[in-house]
Amino acid sequence: MAVVIREIVGFRQDEAGDWIADLACLHRQHIRHQPPFSERPWVLDPAARAARIGTGWDCPLCDRAELPEGLHLVRTAGPFDDVTLPPGLRATHHVAAARWGRLRLLDGAVGFSMDTDPPIVRHMVAGDEQPIPPEVPHRLTVDGPVRLVVEFFARDD
Ligand SMILES: [Zn+2]
């Protein structure tokens, strides 16, 4: 299992002038050149920044399944119960690129596992929520009556 690597899709500056990488997963990560703690002189050079667009960057925020800030709800699937739950959600599947999912368990209990590093494996009960990053394989184990929804989020820009 590898750390989740995401494509850098662009750069922006914060109010202080520090550089932020926009990642394909919708996370935004500060990339600072602060020697001797963080040696990244390339981030100050426009050509070197441009050359990094399209390359990969570790995203520990995806490994921790932290829902990025500033997303909006685009669709809610369900509610499903243990009879109406689409078989595709029980099998290994993933959320589309540039979309986040959030599983919300309304009733019952399910097993959830996801191929982050380390893998997220949990027993969810009514009231639990689990954010799901784009394109990371995961699966549900349903063993009894449940009611759940899956919400999908995206960013406007
Ligand atoms: Zn990410």
Image (cartoon, rainbow, N blue to C red):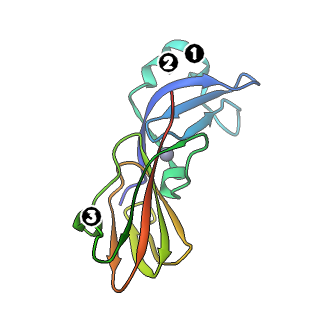
Residue 21 place in picture, x, y as percent: 55, 31
1 or 3: mark nearer the eye:
3
Q: In the rendered image of this protein, does residue 109 appear above or below residue 148?
A: below
As measured in the structure, the alpha-carbon distance from the residue carrying label 3 to the one carrying label 2 is: 38 Å
Residue 114 placement, left or right of 37: left
Which numbered disc flags the more N-terminal residue, 1 or 3?
Answer: 1
- Where residue 54 sits in the image (x, y, percent)? 38, 28
Q: Is residue 119 in view?
A: no
Instruction: Quote the CA–CA distance across marks 1 and 2.
Output: 5 Å
Question: Please, which residue is most extreme toward the right here?
Answer: 16
Q: Secondary structure at mark 1?
A: loop
Tag 3 secondary structure = loop
Q: Quadrant of the N terminus?
A: bottom left
Residue type pointed to by label 1: Asp
Question: Which residue occupies the foreground of this view, 89 or 54?
Answer: 89
Q: Secondary structure at mark 2?
A: helix
Three-letter residue code for mark 2: Ala
In the displayed structure, would residue 46 be above or below residue 90? above
Per the image, the residue denoted by label 2 is: 48
The residue singled out by tag 3 in the image is: 92
Q: Quadrant of residue 80?
A: bottom left
User: Along the horizontal axis of the image, is 110 left or right of 128?
Assistant: left
> Which of marks 2 and 3 precedes in the sequence?
2
Q: Residues within 10 Å of mark 1 (few under 14, many from 20)?
A: few
Q: Is residue 134 above or below residue 87?
A: above
- Tell me the residue that label 1 is attached to: 45
> Picture coordinates of residue 152 (x, y %)?
44, 50
**Which amino acid type corresponds to the residue marked 3 in the rendered image?**
Thr
| C-alpha span from label 1 to label 3 | 42 Å
Residue drawn at 55 percent across, 72 percent down: 128
Is the residue under label 2 in contact with that under label 1 (CB below 8 Å)?
Answer: yes
